[in-house]
Image: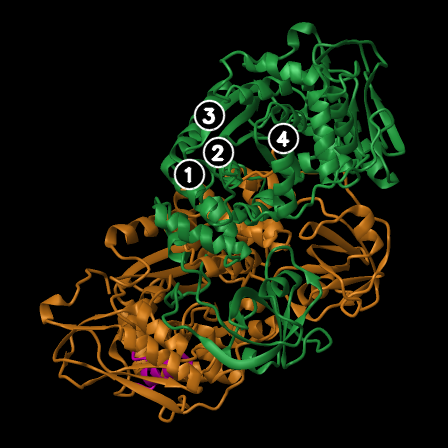
Chain colours: A green, B orange
């Protein structure tokens, strides 16, 4: 909208490089601005006055042959930043990498080189390979403001990217960071598009396929919007924040690892984009495909099994939608020379019993120990996914993978391998018979008799989040009934664990509004027809 | 893109109101974050730790029965904010309106009520009236983060809004702020969609129609991306920042004013949206219509003449495009019961000679004084626009407006009225025979002989901006040749004025890259077939 009634619009790119010569002393301002570089300039700073920098305009900070881009905040308090100083937020300070007091100069930033391409995408045009590379490079180098990042994310949402563009985006995201090369012909991984609480199959698939001898250097994420990520859950058992050199050694020794991928600089543009996608709950097919495949390819994977769960409260609600998504994944994977095996799975309800890091670690360890209390659905799904990965071994016949995976699990070899990996990463004390759950709890019980005809993945996840998961490791939801189970009035449906009274209260209010369970008749249980 | 591999997405709206009881002492942090409220919490602050607020998550700050929403920045320096304190950026502090040290509590904010509607728009759905009212209310109350604002702007860009939605948006923007009621049947205004440097017709139309007796309470904008807005230019002659009560009195006494609208709280959501639209150079038809009409209707206008210039470097490049825009303006105006007269005008080149506040004020005063040096095009265009407005007077016959306007101008009555308005607003010393131009200058001359076959509005505006306009009042570009003029090699095309050596150098570099002038043959001058 234009308030600017009778004048031409700003030039999108200034024609000259507006470098200011003045030198200021760098000062670290201990403010964490969350991935947006901010430079604090005093209002009476000569540079600010002379060059007419406006609040929010972007500047380049030059020091020691380096430069970073940042947004200007204007300061009126010399205790925060003085007239001769140039304040930098934590991130900006770390990126510039000079000492406090080092001289630096500031200039009006050239807009990122890819701005013209961004504007074309906002206008609805198709972009080519070079455009995506330029945009993603600028994003990875933190040259985009939050406004520009958001514009890119919204302008490439929904059907705005054709499959060729998704391929260009994926390729550009891989190119924006480091790419691991394990120097082996077969590097396997599995991934799920998300949306199903408790779905901790990676912690079973990795030790199984590693015990089979396959290289599976699994880097995982922490939860962003969910009650637990694989990294959060693994962290209950072992250290997950490892320097890359150590990670590499563990993988060489044990054929697998379960670590956090945030430190390895793989597809760094993805991490920047997530900071915008998260608050907008944007997760469009094109962006999902580029995000997932770029991380896997950058991690050096050659073979990937991808899990797409479908169900009434899963991310994907129908088989036609799942098939469309599968084809997009397959197209891009093929262009990127990644061998991809997509499996469409039952996403009608959470997998396993526990939702939250400690509860999920308990379920995983019970499956590995072949404990009779182990959740059958988690075991079965993990065996099937591991079986599919094992079949990418040229020595294994199609159809034999499941049995091989089961033998590895039932013989205890998967447990041994898991314990080796845990020891190598740095074990933490954990006893799955006595998991350290949040000391506070409440129970949700059936109000009437019938059959469990629905479990809302979103609502169960929400209750677990409010109870404190994943930040509070022992917080979460422990499910006692699954789809199709008969219940009598008063039967326990789930127990919620928390460590803080406020968290417990928030979770209680949420589950009072909706338990997430539907009790009905047996014929009301929804069906999905999937491979497994 | 999802890094969040196997878990459900965050609930978009938490089910409970997460109010933290703890009291903190408000502390004004003298940082200007440019329209985004920021709250600074120390990392060791109990509230932050217990409630698990994450950097960038949104919180509500409660004090004295009021509350504001803000983004969290985490601070590690007690000199900026201590563990028992709650730091507020300048804007946030002003909005909350309590004293330093006042107790306040902070809670996890309920997401803005309109978030679900925003997500639906991002998904490409059509929104209804209630949706737009909810979104615009949240925007006007600063409940949206920059990320959410950008998502709204990009998701309603281009053809994303149908004309009914543009009407809903306009209506909601009017409803979001104050609406003036002048208690007269006829309140007139004129507006231009922008894009043409030097197009200062408002400063001529207002005194002419006011002298005719029509009520014309013109609130104007400052330049956002252009070398001068009407408010910037008027400020050369008079004070433009007036309290509303004084403005009202001036309008009652003189039937018109030329003041800055930023203080009157008219369509406040528009001002917030501009903070995002500007850096993205977004100016889509729907947003333009809602922005312009909402401001006019909120200001109490009943009759509006709207100027849509077309030309090769104007905002609108062709007649069919101008006609589509005209129909959209007319549809919304009719739904809002605003009488609208759209005129499509010649936008092939700048209007008048001067570009920049002092230079434009000089041109305007020369027209009012009927000085022979007055630019003919500015005079003619202003008379035609004034004539159209005068014809909304039921006592004036269609076709008579232009002659009436000319009589008012040539008789000196417009000058008298302008001087009355200047005196009433608070005159500033100005002599149009000796305007205070920037002391530094350079000249741009024709490199060969021929006819001026093109003047690039964008490039001329860019040179004027780089020279310092509008911040430096005396900076800008003074044109000596217009379209169709014959030139010999070495003839003066324009002179650039600046006050600072750096500005002069930037402008010189820009015009060295491209003067903005095309010298060619007479038959190369582009034609547009417009009313005037």
Residue B481's disc is none
Disc 1: CA contacts within 10 A as few (<14), some (14-19) or many (>=20)? many
Distance of label 2 from label 1 (alpha carbons)? 9 Å
Is A280 drawn above or below residue B68 in the view shown? above
Q: Name the residue under label 4.
A: B6
Q: Name the residue under label 2.
A: A285
Q: Mark 3 points at which residue?
A: A326
Mark 3 — on which chain does it sit? A
Tag 2, which secondary structure? helix
Q: Is residue B516 magenta?
A: no
Q: Which residue is drawn at 67% across and 79% down?
A: A82
Does residue A208 appear left or right of residue B255 in this picture? Answer: right
Range of magenta residues: B352-370
Distance of label 1 from label 4 (alpha carbons)? 22 Å
Disc 2: CA contacts within 10 A as few (<14), some (14-19) or many (>=20)? many
Residue A166's disc is 1
Distance of label 2 from label 4 (alpha carbons)? 16 Å
Residue A364 percent location from the top left of the image: 73, 25
């Amino acid at each position: 909208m234009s308030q600017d009634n009778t004048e031409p619009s700003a030039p999108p790119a200034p024609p000259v490089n507006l470098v200011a010569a003045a030198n200021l002393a760098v000062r670290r301002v201990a403010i964490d601005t969350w991935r947006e570089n901010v430079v604090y300039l005093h209002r009476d700073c000569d540079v600010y006055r002379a060059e007419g920098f406006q609040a929010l305009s972007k500047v380049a900070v030059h020091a020691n042959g380096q430069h970073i881009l940042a947004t200007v905040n204007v300061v009126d308090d010399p205790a925060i930043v003085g007239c001769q100083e140039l304040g930098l937020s934590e991130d900006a300070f770390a990126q510039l990498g000079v000492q406090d007091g080092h001289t630096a100069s500031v200039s009006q930033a050239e807009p990122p080189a890819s701005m013209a391409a961004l504007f074309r995408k906002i206008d609805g045009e198709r972009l080519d390979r070079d455009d995506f590379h330029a945009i993603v490079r600028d994003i990875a180098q933190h040259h985009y403001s939050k406004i520009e990042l958001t514009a890119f994310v919204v302008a490439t949402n929904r059907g705005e990217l054709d499959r060729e563009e998704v391929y260009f985006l994926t390729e550009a995201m891989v190119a924006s960071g480091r790419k691991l090369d394990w120097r082996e012909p077969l590097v396997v991984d599995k991934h799920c598009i998300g949306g199903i609480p408790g779905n901790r199959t990676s912690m079973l698939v990795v030790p199984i396929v590693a015990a089979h001898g396959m290289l599976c250097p699994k880097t995982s994420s922490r939860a962003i919007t969910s009650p637990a990520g694989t990294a959060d859950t693994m962290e209950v058992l072992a250290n997950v924040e490892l320097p890359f050199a150590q990670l590499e050694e563990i993988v060489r020794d044990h054929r697998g690892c379960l670590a956090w991928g945030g430190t390895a600089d793989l597809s760094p543009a993805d991490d920047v984009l997530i900071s915008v996608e998260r608050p907008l709950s944007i997760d469009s097919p094109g962006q999902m495909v580029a995000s997932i495949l770029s991380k896997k390819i950058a991690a050096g994977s050659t073979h990937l099994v991808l899990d797409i769960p479908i169900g009434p409260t899963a991310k994907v609600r129908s088989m036609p939608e799942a098939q469309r998504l599968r084809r997009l994944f397959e197209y891009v994977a093929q262009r990127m020379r990644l061998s991809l095996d997509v499996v469409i799975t039952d996403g009608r309800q959470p997998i396993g019993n526990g939702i939250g890091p400690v509860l999920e670690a308990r379920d995983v360890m019970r499956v590995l120990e072949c404990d009779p209390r182990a959740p059958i659905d988690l075991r079965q799904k993990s065996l099937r996914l591991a079986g599919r990965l094992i079949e990418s071994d040229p020595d294994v016949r199609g159809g034999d993978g499941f049995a091989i995976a089961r033998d590895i699990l039932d013989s205890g070899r998967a447990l041994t391998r898991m314990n080796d990996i845990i020891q190598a990463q740095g074990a933490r004390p954990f006893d799955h018979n006595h998991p350290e759950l949040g000391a506070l709890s409440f129970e949700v019980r059936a109000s009437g008799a019938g059959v469990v005809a629905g479990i809302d993945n979103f609502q169960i996840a929400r209750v677990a989040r409010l109870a404190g998961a994943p930040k509070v490791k022992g917080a979460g939801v422990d499910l006692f009934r699954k789809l199709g189970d008969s219940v009598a009035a008063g039967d326990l449906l789930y127990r919620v664990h928390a460590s803080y009274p406020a968290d417990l209260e928030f979770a209680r209010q949420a589950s009072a509004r909706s338990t997430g369970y539907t009790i009905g008749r047996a014929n009301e249980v929804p069906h999905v027809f999937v491979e497994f």
